[in-house]
Amino acid sequence: MPSAFILKKCTCCNLEFPKTEGYFRKNGNFLRSKCKNCLNKNLPKNTDIEKKKRKSEMFKLWREKNRPRKTIKDNPIKVCCSCKKELPRTEEFFRKRSDFKNNFRSECKNCFDDKQRQRHIEFYKNNTDKEKERHKYFYYRNPEYTKEKNRLQTIKFKPKQVIYDKKRIEDLTDSIIINRIVTQTGLKKEEIPKELIQTKRLITQLKRTLKNN
């Protein structure tokens, strides 16, 4: 009698079944004690997708009861952790990448920009040679691509750059005044003190008022 027709008794329904109607274990050497019909009855009906949906719904109900989410309308004002000023949440704070709709950064825009600027300055001081080599390697590897890319970027961002430069000249930012001092005196940017920048700004403002009058 071949091995396929050897009968085995099921422990659940107490019926005999051949080896072809039974499941083997993971090792592949032994049959399970139950037949296919009994094992399929005991399998869970819900799939993985349905389980995830059910868990998400349960979590939403628990959160609504125990931890209701605060919206922007409930808290329109937020306090900055560095300058400790009360500012409007949507206007003066950057949004987080993880939850772009509701979560905001703990620092306001001005404080965050100042810290990022200092980080960039410290990084380029410590890694000036590496950055120069990186830019040279990228340029000489494919110079035609870089030239074309720079040309398209200038065409794209030229109107915005013009508006930005006009605003800087009207506001008399530190960078513009420092560049004027460097061209007139020949000093280095690091050697220029803050007092000289303030005096130069006042002189330019006086000249503007005299021209307008």
Image: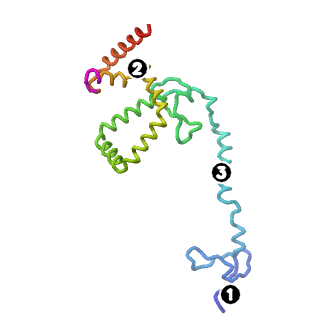
Q: Nearer the viewer, mark 2 or mark 1?
A: 2
- Residue 183 inside the magenta-drawn segment: yes
User: Where residue 55 is drawn, which disc sits there?
Assistant: 3
Report if residue 104 lies within the magenta region.
no
Q: Quadrant of the N terminus?
A: bottom right
Q: Magenta region: which residues?
A: 182-188
Q: Residue at x 46, y 40 (%)?
A: 152
Q: Residues within 10 Å of mark 2 (few under 14, many from 20)?
A: some
Which residue bears the numbered disc 2? 172
Q: Identify the disc placed on residue 66.
A: none
Q: Is residue 152 left or right of residue 3?
A: left
Q: Secondary structure at mark 3?
A: helix
> In the current view of this chain or complex, which residue is farthest to the bottom?
1
Residue beneath label 1, please? 5
Type of amino acid under label 1: Phe
Amino acid type, mark 2: Leu
Q: Position of residue 58 (x, y in %)?
A: 67, 48
Q: Residue at x 70, y 78 (%)?
A: 10
User: Quadrant of residue 188 in the image?
Assistant: top left
Q: CA distance from mark 2 to mark 1?
A: 96 Å
